[in-house]
Image (spheres, rainbow, N blue to C red):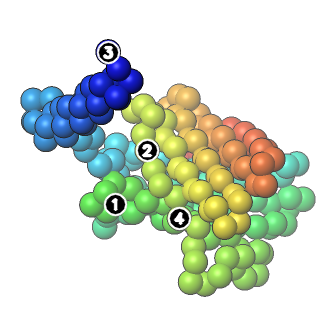
Amino acid sequence: MTFATLKHSCAVCMILLALTVVVCADDPKTAKPETPPLTLKEVSWFAGDWEGEKWGGAVQETWSKPSGGMMMCMFSYTKDGKPVFYEFLTLEQGEQGLTLYMRHFNPKLIGWEDKESPLVFSTRLISAQEIVFERNDPAAKLRIKLVYKLAAQDRLSALLEREKDGKTSVETFTYKRVVR
């Protein structure tokens, strides 16, 4: 077999392989089933009041029950009895699933982010009691991953992983459910 014949045979095989992939992808019997979009009902275990300790102070998150196609959250960090910063979050239902929107504020409610640009996170469910929010901002060389896990009915953990300019930092938050 000459090199030209071998080269021609390889090209024919590659074309046949590509056609097989295209045909199989369009065939409902061989196509992978699409994962249905994530819904608020699947993450309603978030709802409630959560408190913990971090950075030498107190952290608190309050998540609303799903309503109107969204859940909202208020986060506060206080130290020595004084507010340090707040977060306001909404978890919104859309056609493609859930999207998390976040804004930070100082104690006088002056926003950190530009008023036209909240932080936007994609969402995926790892298990029935673990959800991941991710944000990738190539322009700022920043990647943020926030993982919430319901450890028990009264325990919630959050892992915040930030990668900026190739350096990674990880913070862990442990919350206890508060019944008011």
Quickly name the residue at label 4: 120
Label disc, if present, on residue 101 of the rendered structure: none
Quickly name the residue at label 2: 124
Q: Earlier in the sequence, mark 1 or mark 3?
A: 3
- Residue type, mark 4 in image: Val
Quickly name the residue at label 3: 1
Marks 1 and 4 in Cβ contact (< 8 Å) = no
Marks 2 and 1 in Cβ contact (< 8 Å) = no
Q: CA distance from mark 3 to mark 4?
A: 58 Å
Q: Nearer the viewer, mark 1 or mark 4?
A: 4
- Residue type, mark 2 in image: Arg
* Badge 3: residue crowd in 10 Å (few <14, some 14–19, many ≥20): few
Residue 120: where, in percent of width, then height? Answer: 53, 64
Question: Residue drawn 62% across and 70% down?
Answer: 103
Relative to 151, does residue 167 appear above or below in the rendering?
below
Question: Residue drawn 32% across and 15% down?
Answer: 1
Question: Residue drawn 24% across and 36% down?
Answer: 15
Residue 128: where, in percent of width, then height? Answer: 39, 33
Relative to 110, does residue 162 appear above or below in the rendering?
above
* Secondary structure beneath label 1: strand
Q: Nearer the viewer, mark 3 or mark 4?
A: 3
- Residue type, mark 1 in image: Gln
Q: Earlier in the sequence, mark 3 or mark 4?
A: 3
